[in-house]
Image (cartoon, rainbow, N blue to C red):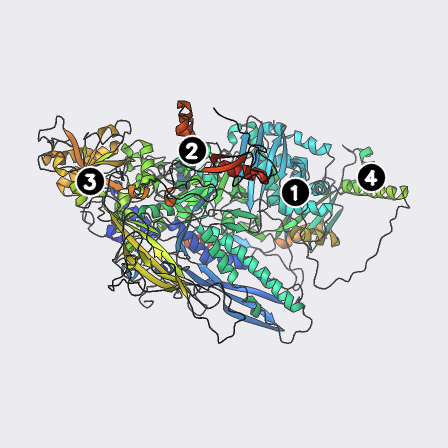
Amino acid sequence: MPSKRKSEDHHHEETDTFSEMLKPVYKGKTMTDQINTAEDKWNLLPAFLKVKGLVKQHLDSFNYLMDTDLRKIIEANETILSDVDPEFYLKYLDIRIGHKSTSPPGTREVILPPHECRLRDLTYSAPIYVDVEYTRGRKIIMHRDLEIGRMPIMLRSNKCVLDGRTEEEMALLNECPLDPGGYFIVNGTEKVILVQEQLSKNRIIVEADEKKNIVQASVTSSTHERKSKTYVVTKNDKIYLKHNSISEEVPIVIVLKAAGITSDLEIMQLVCGDDPVYQDLFVVNFEEAAKLNVYTQKEALEYIGLKVKTMRRLNAPRLTVLQEGTEAVATTIIAHLTVSDLNFREKALYISMMTRRVVMAMHDPTMVDDRDYVGNKRLELAGQLMSLLFEDLFKKFNSDFKANIDKILKKPNRASEFDALLSINIHSNNITMGLNRAISTGNWSLKRFKMERAGVTHVLSRLSYISALGMMTRISSQFEKSRKVSGPRALQPSQFGMLCTADTPEGEACGLVKNLALMTHITTDDEEAPVKKLCFILGAEDIMKLDSSAINAKGTFGVYLNGTLIGATRFPAKFVTSFRTLRRTGRVSAFISIYTNEHQFAVHIATDGGRICRPLIIVENGESRVKAQHLADLLNGEMNFDDFLAAGLVEYMDVNEENDSFIALYEKDISSVITHMEIEPFTVLGAVAGLIPYPHHNQSPRNTYQCAMGKQAIGAIAYNQFKRIDTLLYLMVYPQQPMVKTKTIELIDYDKLPAGQNATVAVMSYSGYDIEDALVLNKASLDRGFGRCQVLKKNTTVLKRYPNHTKDIVAGMRVDENGDPVFQHQSLGPDGLGEVGMRVETGQVYVNKHVPTNAGESVLGQPQAHQPIEEHRETPVTYRAPEPSYIDQVMMSVSDNDQALIKVLLRQTRRPELGDKFSSRHGQKGVCGIIVQQEDLPFNDDGISPDIIMNPHGFPSRMTVGKMIELISGKAGVLDGSLQYGTCFGGSKLEDMSKILVDKGFSYSGKDMLYSGITGECLQAYIFFGPIYYQKLKHMVMDKMHARARGPRAVLTRQPTEGRSRDGGLRLGEMERDCVIAYGASQLLLERLMVSSDAFEVDVCNSCGLMGYNTWCTTCKSSEHVIKMTIPYAAKLLFQELLAMNIAPRLKLGDVF
Amino acid sequence: MSLFVPEEEEVLEVPVYTQTIEDIQVAEEEEDPVEWEIPVAMNPLPASGPGEEVTFSLLQFPGRPAKRPYNIETESMPLHSRYKEASQSIELEIPMNTGRFYDALKADSWNQVTTQTLGGPFVETDGYYVGVLDQGIMKLIPLHRSAQLRPTFTHIDAKKDAEKAMLKDAMKAENPTKSKEILVQMSVKSASDQQPRLGGCLAATKKFDEEEWEELEWVDESLEQSETVRRVLLRSNDLSKVVESKMSADEYSAMLFSA
């Protein structure tokens, strides 16, 4: 197949799902139709998704890691030197994933296809090759393609075998072409690294606590080596610098003096400029320094040096106080700006800018930053997290290697010439195992940051296609869920278009877990150096040459690159415009953002990764740059989205830059001040919320509820769903695409993998079994397959091998006297495995496994010849469930450690029953309350009876008008033979729909005249009647139904077990107990809490009060006062536990009557 | 009231960012016509000798108004100028006006200070030139490095160090017999546990401290010598040195954003 594979061509036209939308005739529109820029600009969206895909943020970040970041890590940890032999060195030259140096870049080594890894519980990974150069004796040796481990590969990344495959090729690999990728397969499970939201690093955040009268500016510095936080805080109106490794707060003037700004005048210029208000606020700080007798740089450094908490590493030289101070200022404080020479200016300016921001906020409390503002957030993606992990493991690998060679080199006279590579391979498993373990457990432990983070990865939810997709766009926040602040949970105005406004869970994670909107892009790191150079060329003056008084002069704007002041300009507008022009012409990376902050008199340029941005159409002189011709070119395939970007028609805007522009929603809103225009307003919603028809007509929480429920809907999962063997898989038998679609549904291919069916709904009351949102279902519809689903459960068996060379086996079936298999073995084949298609009932065996009886015995000490005959004991895998299943698939394979792996997939087909849960797409869920014969249901003039009857009380309080419009549009679509749209902020117009209804002889309102199925009389009212898309949710009665009379008990307490899975009892809890007490039913209480639970007869000695046994008190050595009584076993247990703690609970018994 | 007296040249009426998008467009198209084209000549520095290159450095004095340079005229020509080649640092000693605002008492405590020491490290510069419009030609001389010189207050540090030393001596003098018996343990330092070297800034500081100052001769701008140098710098008048762009605007903009 590799021969068939195409090269790095992203424009596969033939089968690409998006290209269909770009074909000459699509959805009834041809190329000759007039192009309306206002309507047709939405075509940019499929074009965008065609280039970027739905999970591009994950793929982009992983590709960046593979192509750029790994190389940077190698460069940062380039050489390994020996402490013993100064001559020795080893140097990493290059790193490649998945291909050797001999093959041209871009080719991929053939690795195991992902689906095979899923089935065989393997890890989908590719080898990591490095090129090294090292010394052997006097020679310098170059070694290429040294494998140092294996890297788990993200599916659909550019290192994945699926990259650039056509649909046919994907089918051959048993892969679903609609599967978005973006996850890893580790030990057979699909793992997603969720996007993590963080406060941006290396940026100043100013906050104020007005009650405590505190203003603080903080910056989290993050470099490859360390992470630390520096604060500039006010205390009694004086300003101090605070840092974890400095034991107490240092007056800010001392810090600035230590950073080389020796004159008070210059400090004043840098912090206050020539604003007398700021000067008055700040001047007190000079006194602070003078009181402490600190005037010179040396004095200041020594002052700080005394306060530094010294943490000496092993072997590190002892430093003088002055050196400690220098080290603290140069590297510890604001660690991301490390001073490596004598020039402290950059750092001094950074600290003074922090101070300036504090002074500004002291004067004007509105000058604080908002932590929750999306522009102050960065998203950490799979690539960044993997890079942190890899660097940690790589450093460990190198230090292990160094320790190893030192050990060997220390030996005074070695026999042979030392070859370092011989010892590098010994521990080559570390990287592989470390990466695998972190991804499969989700525990990210980074030694160098002393960081432990749990729950980074999650198992990809394959409940439905939407749930998998929803997981890929999910963002989890670092905030504690328990904290009682509303700010981080609230909807932020700045998240418009970036994060979905509807999709968030209810309950404790509400607002903390978010989802990406449809058109968001998350940036990866860009190089700083060329941008810096460009700034100077564009007229920014270098801070190294700039006079301190000029920096804060009126009309001068500081130029900040990733939060660090690099220069200043007097003409910010011109500077920003020319920078943007260069970006729009493609000279500067499209993802670098630039904006002016007029409050801070600053121009901020950001090149860092993790910023959220989205494309917008550029508007100039009150005119959209995208013209009809461009859209025509797009439709006939002459232009793609990247061409639009390169031509300067659209550009990416991050949240900060968005704040610096005027964005029109529609073409009609454009005026001369407008700078940008939305591509499509419905992209404010994400993929999951995009399924809702007419969401703009619904009450907002209903949309949020639907987002949660859409992920629980049973439907088609992927094209390869029948080839998958998952722990638990729900499939709908006859899924349908919705009658009322949205643009998003088409874009994310929900119409190809739907989860639901179009049900004919009558909104009326029927039978009284429809209270509390219960639904009435039509029995004939269920017979026809409505709501029918399949449940597939996996069962894994491993045939183990034991150290004494015995192993588990699978044996054939046992037969009765007639030669027929016994009941238990009826579904087995001659090989001892269940046969595909056989029915298994409870108690029947589907893997007839036997384990050796002597597995524990050691083989050692026995004569070689004397091999014991293997004897086996039956340990069959038995099916236990109330309902029978059918064997769907049986798979046998060999896992990593050479043990046979048997997976049996069991299938149940379920039709809806009372209590099964259904929901429409408007957050309106209900359970089936009654199933009615079709004859008894109402019918209309055409004889149509509903599939579902929904009680009208569901509408007034929920205000889901969208559902009503969906019904009307759906009905119009049915009558018209068309599919209608319910796209957010658009879609088919109600007026048009009503017109279709009227034309077809129906009421414009969607109401029909129905006849009672029971009496045949015409119903008193017109009934709202038509199709609504209904989803069957995974909560089914069969999985929950549970009752028990007598059953298993827990060993320790002898009380009934808990939970359905353990056939547990139903608990009479403390609140129920309170009721019984209040009622005074003491005997009932006794029966419930003791007799039916853990009654136990004890022998109590009435003289000592302790418990004995067999009418004998062991304490008194007599049976004289021993009395039998019944107490709960738990009470007896408590007494004994107390005794064990040297506390003697003594029972004093008295007569009741 | 401003604390700092703005310098005359710097009083430029720069409006605080009030430009709108329209303004920019107007400015780009109408208000910025080409009025005068000036040929540019690159004047590299003449070599002082074979194989040697002259470095052209800019000294900046933040905290000193540009109107009052350190020269003979203001009676503040540096007395000494010192230079550390390896550390790329410079230090100037400026005479103080002992006639005005001079506290003789304070000076006594600082060992009769009559000079002020300014110092600072050099920073490489790229893309900065000294330009002279001479006979209709803009002559550009590339600037190699610049340094911002700030007061180092060495006299305060010197005094403190002296006090500390005195204190130490006094302590020693007080309890002279308190020399402890020290058990001398001989240990052979093996080659393996080499001391890790100081890194980054500390290494630079150490290098700076260990390096000796090298005295440089200061020539005042008013002297004949300076005039000669100035003349040498601007010597060429031939139009052959006039630079002409071989790049198109497109090529230039492509070059802007690259390594």
Please state which amino acid type lies under the numbered disc 2.
Answer: Leu
Q: Which subunit holds the residue at mark 1?
A: A
Mark 4 or mark 1, whichever is nearer to me: 1
Q: Earlier in the sequence, mark 1 or mark 2?
A: 1
For the residues labelled 1 and 3, say whether their Cβ atoms are less than 8 Å apart. no
Instruction: State the separation of the CA atoms marked 2 and 4.
Output: 96 Å
Per the image, the residue denoted by label 2 is A1089
Residue sitting nearer the eye, A934 or A470 = A934
Q: Circle 1 sits in a helix, a strand or a loop, which is it?
A: loop
Mark 4 in CB contact with mark 1 (< 8 angstroms): no
Q: Is residue A473 left or right of residue A96?
A: left
Tell me the distance, in whole angstroms, between the alpha carbons under discs 4 and 1.
28 Å
Pick the residue in front: A457 or A544.
Answer: A457
Q: Disc 1 designates what residue?
A: A259
Q: Earlier in the sequence, mark 1 or mark 3?
A: 1
Residue A353 visible in the snapshot: no
What type is the residue that disc 1 sits on?
Answer: Ala
- For the view shown, which residue lies furthest in the front direction? A1120
On the same chain, marks 3 and 4? The answer is no
